[in-house]
Structures are given as C-alpha cells and as structure tokens.
Image (tube, grey):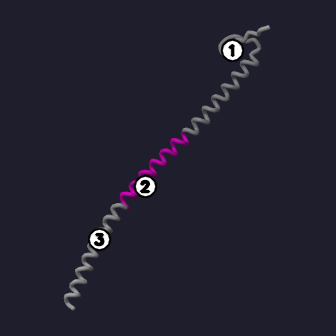
Amino acid sequence: MHEDLERVKEILRLKEEKFVTNFTKLEKESLDLKQQIESLLVENHSLHEKFKQAEIEQAANKRWYDSSDALNWLNTHHNRGRKGLGFETHSISL
C-alpha cells in the first residue's frame, strides 16, 4: 500500500509539472497573441485615419473639379466677347 501511495504521489507530481509547463506555454502564447492584436489594432486605427483623410481629400478635389468645370462652362458660354487673362477666345464659324 505504501508503494501504491508513492506511485500515486509520483504520478501527481509529474502531472503537476506537465500542467505548469503547459500553463506557462499557453500563458506565453496568450501574451504573444495579445501583442499581435494590439499591433493590429494600432495599424487598423492608422489605416482608418488615412482612409478618412483620403475621403476628405477626394471630396475637396471633387469640389475643385466641379467648380472648374462650372467656370469653364460659364467662360465658354457667357464670356460675351471679353478678352484677356482668364477669357478664352472662340471663333464663330459661319
């Protein structure tokens, strides 16, 4: 019976060592994954900010191009023969 008790104690000690080893390994993996997640969150935030900036720039460029198109149309259709800087000359062909 004493031998059985010693064998059970040895088995428990080995299982405890294995548990501690596995727990330590899993804890390290967990910390590594946490760092990866934090890094990805920072990268995601940065990309989101760049995307918002690109949207703002696109909207500004669209307004610029739309206003340029409008001014070109006005200049083409309503310059009333004006000449000089900013006015295009159009010849009327008969």
Q: Residue 47's x, y, as percent?
A: 49, 44
73 vs 6, nearest the viewer: 6
> Which residue appears at 68% of the width and 25% of the height?
69
> In this rendering, which labeled residue sits more in front, label 1 or label 2?
2
The label number, if any, that marks residue 20 in the structure image: 3
Q: Residue 28's x, y, as percent?
A: 33, 61
Residue 90 magenta-drawn? Answer: no
- First along the sequence among labels 2 and 3: 3
> Which residue appears at 57% of the width and 35% of the height?
57
> In this rendering, which labeled residue sits more in front, label 1 or label 3?
3
> Which residue appears at 28% of the width and 75% of the height?
16
Quarter of the image where one finds residue 7: bottom left
Q: Residue furthest right?
A: 94
> Which residue appears at 45% of the width and 49% of the height?
42
10 Å neighbourhood of mark 1: few (<14), some, or many (≥20)?
A: some
55 vs 23, nearest the viewer: 23
Spatial CA span between label 2 and label 3: 25 Å
Q: Is residue 94 left or right of residue 45?
A: right
Report which residue position mark 2 lands on. 37
Spatial CA span between label 1 and label 3: 84 Å
Type of amino acid at the residue the image marks with label 1: Phe
In which quadrant of the rendered image does the C terminus lie? top right
Q: Residue furthest bottom?
A: 1
Report which residue position mark 1 lands on. 87
Tags 2 and 3 in contact by the CB under 8 Å rule?
no
Type of amino acid at the residue the image marks with label 3: Val
10 Å neighbourhood of mark 3: few (<14), some, or many (≥20)?
A: few
> What span is in magenta?
30-53
